[in-house]
Amino acid sequence: MKMKETRLTRDTKRPSKNGMYAKALARWDAEGGAGTGKPDSFSEKDSSRPRPCQDIELTQLRTRVIALENLVIALLARGSKRQRREVLDMAAFISPRQGASPHYLTIEAANRMRHLVGRGNHFSASPNI
């Protein structure tokens, strides 16, 4: 039995994966990943337009974040004092500077980083830095 050869045609209206990837990387390089929250040039019919997250996706995302936090705690517990100090330095670095407008998410991220170091210290053989 002979199999019929099927050729996949590329939809020219959809942006290429490489193009979207390059654009995302360029935005990270230029703006630190900050986007406007609005799609750049998506049409209403464009299937590559992001769709709202469903409950199951949010649950999976939360589970992954919990797993990553516990992984970081385990790594910090086994890490050196210098490595834990670097995490605290990064938390201080992303905290708002005097005169800058504070952003809630950045402040919360810095607080969580400090908390992760504290939890790592709890499980460390050489606690407290």
Image (cartoon, rainbow, N blue to C red):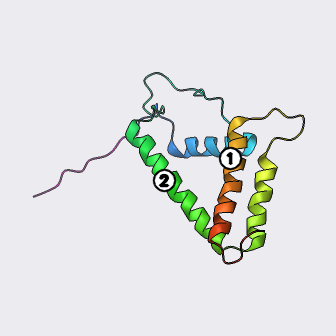
Residue at mark 2 = 64
Spot the residue most to the bottom.
Answer: 125
Q: Is residue 102 above or below residue 28?
A: above
Mostly what secondary structure, the magenta segment?
loop
Q: Is residue 21 left or right of residue 114?
A: left
**Along the viewing direction, whichever of 98 and 13 lies nearer the viewer:** 98
Magenta stretch contains residue 5 = yes
Are there few (<14), some (14-19), or many (20+) residues within 10 Å of tag 2? few
Please give the count of numbered marks on the rendered protein: 2
**Along the viewing direction, whichever of 9 and 113 lies nearer the viewer:** 113
**Along the viewing direction, whichever of 88 and 1 lies nearer the viewer:** 88
Residue at mark 1 = 109
Which labelled disc corresponds to residue 94? none
**Which residue type does callout 2 highlight?**
Arg
Q: Could you tell me which residue is drawn at 51 percent across and 36 percent down?
A: 15
The quadrant in which the N terminus is found is bottom left
Spot the residue most to the right.
Answer: 99
Q: Could you tell me which residue is drawn at 66 percent across and 51 percent down?
A: 112
Q: Which residues are magenta?
A: 1-10
